[in-house]
Image (cartoon, rainbow, N blue to C red):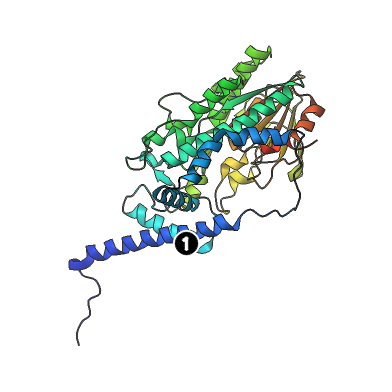
Amino acid sequence: MKKVILFSKKYGFSVLFLIFIFFMFANYLLGIGSAVLHEFSGPSDETGKKTEYIDGWAAIQAEVNALHADDEKKAVDEPSLVKNFENTWHALTSSISSLPSFVLEDSFLKLNASFCRAIGMGYIPGTTFVKLDQGMLTYVEDDASLAEAQKNIEKRLCYLNEFAEIVKQEGIDVTYINVPNKSYALMQQCPIGLRPDTLTNPNRYVAQKLAEYGIPCVNVWIEDGVDRELFYKTDHHWKIACGISAAKAVSEYLNQAYAYNIDTGIYDDENYEVVVYEDVLLGSIGTNSTGAFVSAEDMEVYYPKTDMHYRFAIPSKNIDLEGGFDIFINKQKLDDKGQWPFNAYAAYIYANSAYVSIQNESIEDDHRVLIIKDSFANVVVPYLAQSIGHVDVLDIRDSQADYYSDSVIELIKENQYDNIFFIASEPFDMHLLFVKE
């Protein structure tokens, strides 16, 4: 009987190479197919509620839309087949990292990630993330995405400037806290070939535009040589210690600019007990790589040694608590490893919520501060609450499941805040600032 040889040393390398090519090609096809469905399905309006905006909204919107009208018209009038292909390819292949979890896609990506890890690759073709040395994951940025980011920054800060002018009539100043964005901060450390030609950090551009508008900006990012230790390896967020440093920077700013009387020594390291929770964080980038590419990492929680009493409310989540600092921490996110993904960062102030209210009943301080934020502020807010009598927090990003859709301007008039802060790693869509009262 003739022996059939399916695999031999002679052809072994060729077979492995063909299998690798097949997986890479299939991964791109799957990413493109899923992305097409995602792009053309469009957002669904489950509530059917129509948003009404303040008087003057049309003029504000027209001003924002005029910023890049000439560029957009030129792109339409002078279409480039090559450029259109590049933009479409970038949009479709990038979408795979932000798609909902489909069983087939997740299984295939996990298999692909396992293969890439086995052969020592630091990049999974068809995705937008890369592994640097020492296991640090970050998103890949290219010239097209940076150019788009710059346009979005201009438009969104134009909205912010209009909003600042409105609340100034109430005698309230707006200040922007400029937080380091991981993918921008580490893009120069990406391998050659995955590094953009134009190394312009959008965080720097935010500071420049705010200066042009005359909006105060507190920069809590390093201008040059950003330390990767600021960030978690598997997540896009910064570490808890950075949140405490940001709270200190905000407090110092309030002392200097508005004569607050905050003892900033409360933010010194010796005033905290650090508890490390092991293998509880597989952040946004780690989750997208399915855990086959990286392992969960530890996360620390900084508990103040000074006892204080707070009232803490999140109406949309039926949370109304009072007690010490630990009421800000969702312990279930730190203790339960049975739920995928392990997102311990969401333990702080119960992740992203439409509206959060914190009253510090242990200090004599009548100041009221409003924070409008993205998720980076979740580890800033509870530490800042040690120094300010009342802190309200809004998340107006309608990309979130729980976001504030009522009138921000009406809330401001009702509460007469002393200061308003925007805390974000990148300016977000701000149209909900102008919801009608």
Image vertical order of residue 196 relative to residue 364, above or below: below
Q: Position of residue 329 (x, y in %)?
A: 65, 38
Q: Is residue 137 left or right of residue 301?
A: left
Note whether residue 27 is visible: yes
Image vertical order of residue 19 relative to residue 340, above or below: below
Image vertical order of residue 217 relative to residue 437, above or below: above
Q: Position of residue 159 (x, y in %)?
A: 64, 32
Residue bearing the label numbered 1 = 107
Determine which quarter of the picture holds residue 305.
top right
Looking at the rendered image, the quarter that the C terminus falls into is: top right
Q: Please tell me which residue lies in front, 373 or 406.
A: 406
What residue is drawn where x is 76% and y is 50%? 49
Q: Position of residue 57 (x, y in %)?
A: 72, 35
Determine which quarter of the picture holds residue 378.
top right
What residue is drawn where x is 57% and y is 43%? 344
Q: Residue furthest bottom?
A: 1
